[in-house]
Amino acid sequence: GAKSRVTVVGSGNWGSVASKLIASNALKLPSFHDEVRMWVFEETLPNGEKLSEVINQINENVKYLPGIKLGKNVVADPDLEHAVRDANMLVFVTPHQFVEGICKRIAGKIRKDAEAISLIKGMEVKMEGPCMISSLISQELQINCCVLMGANIANEISVEKFSEATVGYRGNKEIAERWVQLFNHPYFMVSAVQDVEGVELCGTLKNVVAIAAGFVDGLEMGNNTKAAIMRIGLREMKAFSKLLFPSVKDSTFFESCGVADLITTCLGGRNRKCAEAFARNGGKRSFDELEAEMLQGQKLQGVSTAKEVYEVLRHRGWLELFPLFATVHEICSGHYPPSAIVEYSDHTPKFS
Ligand code: NAD
Ligand code: 13P
């Protein structure tokens, strides 16, 4: 059959690493076109050059992934509609707050047979209730959308250190296998589970727990406290996921997307890092300020996710069932001090 054409929608830290990984496989696998297009949200660098042009000249994303060659078959394209037009495999990997706008711009302008996968950790809350990013993509573009989540700190994968990831799919196993083929690598072991909501909620909710873990680090409370916060957080992740989607499987929490991603993010992620600084400053400097200063253009997902989760909890009358999630939002929004993370994050086991 015809070769698949892949476009990566997004070129931040993880977007760039995902492009590198995919590009290396596309070269090796005959059923994929060699060229991998990567949509770049264009920006002008301090020296006046355009980011997409520099990427194409030196094969490196100098702003979001400096020092790493992406592979000669990665082509940066600043024109979104042009970048997606001919692709039948679309990989979405932007900060979650930009997805809806991106989908609205490309709706009706993609191939009818296109398949999508989302690497995006986050959710939207609409009037009708919560909407996962893969559902948003599916609804806006009228296409199927799988997810890929896991213990995947991008900078570590960029230097080819071993890690694992989980593909979540809905019904069609052949499509899931095609995505596994595209991503799987000796240093990136991918497995697929039929639980798209479970996989995506794991990836989304662990960012809220990582904020809590960062507070604990900033307050210098030690390893036992941090482990306790991670355990309580994991319990809330599971309970919340199952209340929203009863089909979510227990086994999903033991995949890379579950406990492994929770651990790596609470140890080495950006959400943890900025939350630590927030607590060290006694909550006096905002997350927006810390994000801009510490991440240089990269984006946090945990603070907005905590707010989105809080809205769902409030609407459904579930606030008392999720004291850790609720407390993270109260701290981020300045209502409680960072120390509240251990004072209010429940101790009674409501879910076993
Ligand atoms: P990032 O945090 O590096 O984000 C910056 C990106 O957002 C840049 O490409 C920037 O150009 C783009 N951007 C800024 N303003 C924009 C706008 N108005 N419209 C569209 N794009 C805009 O991005 P990332 O690390 O690739 O993260 C993308 C997703 O992947 C997130 O959901 C994140 O949680 C997830 N993720 C990240 C990692 C990681 O280690 N970085 C690992 C796994 C998953
Ligand atoms: P941070 O966004 O907190 O760095 O987490 C990255 C991640 O999702 C690792 O899997």
Image (tube, rainbow, N blue to C red):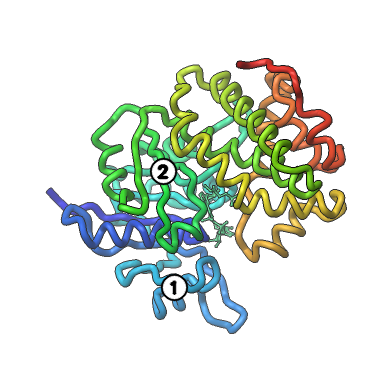
Q: Report which residue position mark 2 lands on.
A: 165
Of residue 276 and residue 59, the one placed in the foreground of this image is 276
In screen coordinates, is 189 left or right of 247? Answer: left
In which quadrant will I find the C terminus?
A: top right
> Does the Cβ of the disc 1 residue fall within 8 Å of ligand 1?
no
In screen coordinates, is 313 left or right of 69? Answer: right
Q: Quadrant of residue 240?
A: top right
Dot in front, 2 or 1: 2
Q: Report which residue position mark 1 lands on.
A: 60
**Mark 1 nearby-residue class (10 Å; few <14, some 14–19, many ≥20):** many
Image position, residue 246 (x, y; %): 50, 17
Q: Element at badge 1?
A: loop
At 74% from the left and 22% from the top, the residue drawn is 319
Q: What is the three-letter code of the residue carrying label 2?
A: Ala
What distance separates the C-alpha of mark 2 from that of mark 1? 24 Å
Is disc 2 in contact with disc 1, using a CB cutoff of under 8 Å? no
Image position, residue 42 (x, y; %): 52, 68
Q: Quadrant of residue 137?
A: top left
Q: Is residue 317 visible?
A: no
Q: Tell me if residue 216 comes above or below residue 309 in the rendering.
A: below
> Does the Cβ of the disc 2 residue fall within 8 Å of ligand 2?
no
Q: Residue furthest bottom?
A: 47
Image position, residue 125 (x, y; %): 62, 34
In screen coordinates, is 257 left or right of 170? Answer: right
At 79% from the left and 51% from the top, the residue drawn is 278
Image position, residue 222 (x, y; %): 74, 43
**Mark 2 nearby-residue class (10 Å; few <14, some 14–19, many ≥20):** many
Q: Element at badge 2?
A: strand
Q: Tell me if residue 19 comes above or below residue 147 in the rendering.
A: below
Where residue 256 is drawn, which disc sits there?
Answer: none
Sequence-wise, the earlier of marks 2 and 1 is 1
Of residue 81 and residue 336, the one placed in the foreground of this image is 336
